[in-house]
Image (cartoon, coloured by chain):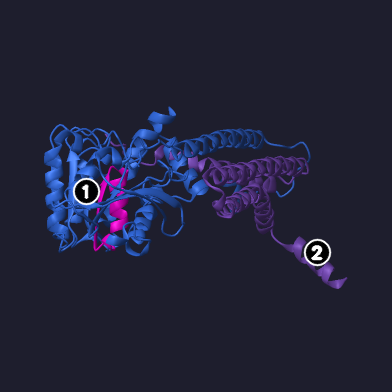
Chain colours: A purple, B blue
Amino acid sequence: MSSQSFNTFSGSAQNPSSQYKGSALRGALVGLIPLGLLIVIVAVTFLLTALARQLVASSGFFAQQQAAVIVLIAGLAVALVVYIIAIVRTLRSITAWQRGGAVGQARAALLALGFTALVVLLPVVLALVLPQNPAQ
Amino acid sequence: MSSRSPSSVTPVTQPQGGLKTTDRLLRWIVVALLVVSVIVTTLYTALSIYIATQLVYVPQKPNYATPASLGLQFKYVTFPSRTDQVQLKGWYIPGVLPNGNLTSQRTIIMVHGKGANRTDKSAGLLNLSGELARHGFAVLAFDMRDSGESPPAPLSLGYFEQRDVLGAVDFLRSGPIPYPALGRTRIIGGWGVSMGAATLMMAAAQEPVIRAVVSDCAYADIIPILEREIPKGSHLPLMFTPGGLFATRVLYGMDFYSVRPEDIVANIAPRPILFIHGTSDTFVPPSNMDALAAAARTAPNANVQTWLVPGAAHAQSFNTEGAAYVDRVVAFYNAALGPDTSV
């Protein structure tokens, strides 16, 4: 089709710099998928925990605590498994890109994964550096 | 990175097997970071959840006696907390007038501390209730949630418990009258110790029906105390405290960071407040009273009194001062609530 021919033509006509930027952006986005999944699942888990707490509020404290803890731990476990699977898949894609010679895309994805690791560590780092003033 | 600068553009494709050492190194660094972040954050999260579940659970203690042991009349009462309708148990003790008649005109709501109940032997709460009753004040002594005979609930150090105090106010204002012959209570005051005092202030700040407040060894802000007590109780470093507090928010919907009576105490004005604190209180240091009194005095029409009890440990001012404590508190309530007109 003519439009397809046109697109192909215009793509090959782009300069190497913009082509690099496009593939790097795609790599970065792929690298951020595990972080996105993690944030979404953790947010949903928090919402479900609050919902579970409300739903069993009339059943007493122990039932309420049990429901909230089960939902929270199950949700976080799902988040952890999904996160690890997403990371493994992303690393495999990166390997494939590196072998295929798409080094810029692979590098961007790797950097995004590195950023993801830092974001995941951020709460712990914040807990370390946040000022605390225990009563004497 | 220089490879991204226009002057040195990296080729989009490279021949297979042309992986640079820097790319290999970057890959290893990122993988190591990912592994470390997953392990560290998972451990931190798990320990934070553990801290949260330990923090909010305090085993309930049974009440050791009843007002009958002091020769006083009383009735068992049950009333719901405001908002969440937790069914709370308590006693209504009518005041005893000098002529021996009973009265319910002025009622003091007694609010106990953490891990205690409406008798609280350690702080002498039942004895103080008896003393107030003998001085002509009716007393509503009740167990807050997760205390005494009231249902189990997460301990929130005042965040949820203020609803219990507000429930007590509702009960006195519109609930069944414990002694119909004495009529409904005309005026309400409050006395609280430690967590009970902080809770009472948070309730009084939003409920003008509470006409006078005695706050015995309240905290101005719970966070510094938790930052000291959580590491001590959990044997974990200080860095786990914020995680534990965040986990309580997710699991139980409570926000310890908002348990700061010093932020709201000025709203109690012009109603009078008497702050009492022991000089030997190492659990809630006396500086908390200074902070609360200073905050309360920021109101233009503040009516604030303070009493630093020499040598008294945490929640021990009544036991240390005995009759002097009763005289001072009774004088405060008489001035704040006015005389009983049924004499």
Q: Are marks 1 and 2 on the same chain?
A: no
**Magenta span covers which residues?**
B182-204
Give above or below for B323 relative to B211: above
Given residues A50 and B21, the one toward you in this image is A50
Element type at marker 2?
helix
Q: Position of residue B322 (x, y in %)?
A: 15, 37
Residue B222: quarter of image:
top left
Q: Residues within 10 Å of mark 1 (few under 14, many from 20)?
A: many
Reply above or below: B232 against A67. Answer: above
Q: Residue at x 40, y 34 (%)?
A: B230
Q: Chain of mark 2?
A: A
Q: Position of residue B302 (x, y in %)?
A: 16, 60
Asked whether, in this view, residue B291 is left or right of residue A127, the answer is left
B248 and B119: which is toward the camera: B119
Which element type, helix, strand or loop, lies under badge 1?
helix
Residue A55 position in % (x across, y down):
59, 54
Q: Name the outermost residue toward the top.
A: B235
Residue B234 is a magenta residue: no
The residue that mark 2 highlights is: A8
Question: Mark 1 sits on what residue?
Answer: B133
| Real-space Cα separation, disc 1 to disc 2, in angstroms | 93 Å
